[in-house]
Amino acid sequence: MDRAQKEKVVEELGQIFESSGVVVVAHYEGLTVAEMQDLRGRAREAGSSVRVAKNRLAKIALEGKPCESITSYLTGMTVLTYSEDPVAAAKVVEDFAKENKKFEILGGAMGETALDRAGVEAVSKMPSREELIASIVGCIGAPASNIAGAIGAPASNIASILSTIEEKAA
């Protein structure tokens, strides 16, 4: 890799570190190509990405970035999993790590907040952005349906009272 290619990689990694909601660092030593492809496929489905980069270049890219604290995790054969959604990448790596004992999560960063192994696990258990939006929409829609039910209820009550009176009269 020549100097221009290295500079391009450092620039790409810098963009990743700046724009990602979460970055998770893991060791992947011993995984097969098929297992790595499985991880990439899962990440793609969840809206996150997987990137293997030289640790030295990643450390250069981290300088001055909000998640600079993950520099200490960049030793050995590391893989970066990242996403704009602060939960997606963490969920993908946690699920993958449960099935693949060779895949070891080291930690990560969520913005300026450094995450250790337990922190990544805690983030993975949080609801995703889509789940939060769905619950907010449900909360917003519930009062409207309650109001519609309350408005319609008196009419149905009156109808049932009238039918009861009519039955008694007959």
Image: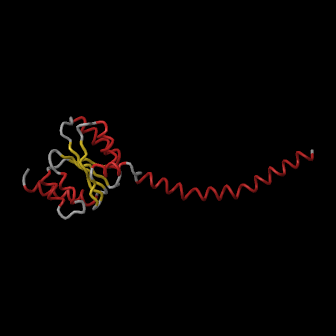
- Decide if residue 57 is on the left or right side of residue 24: left
Question: Which colour style is shown?
Answer: secondary structure
Looking at the picture, how far across and down is residue 90, in whole percent? 32, 49
> Which residue in the rendered view is the most extreme toward the bottom?
64
- Decide if residue 87 is on the left or right side of residue 101: right
Q: Relative to the observer, which residue lies in front, 80 or 4? A: 80
Residue located at (21% from left, 46% from top)? 79
Query: In the rendered picture of this protein, how many numbered marks are placed on residues?
Result: 0
Looking at the picture, how far across and down is residue 92, in whole percent? 32, 45
> Which residue in the rendered view is the most extreme toward the right?
170
Looking at the picture, how far across and down is residue 50, in whole percent? 25, 47
Q: Relative to the observer, which residue lies in front, 40 or 98? A: 98
Q: Relative to the observer, which residue lies in front, 8 or 13? A: 13
- Decide if residue 128 is on the left or right side of residue 17: right
Residue located at (58% from left, 56% from top)? 142
Residue located at (90% from left, 46% from top)? 168
Q: Quadrant of the C terminus?
A: top right
With respect to residue 108, does 77 lie above or below?
Answer: above
> Which residue in the rendered view is the most extreme toward the left?
2
Specify the quadrant of the image occupied by residue 64.
Answer: bottom left
Q: Relative to the observer, which residue lies in front, 128 or 114? A: 114
Looking at the picture, how far across and down is residue 120, in whole percent? 31, 50
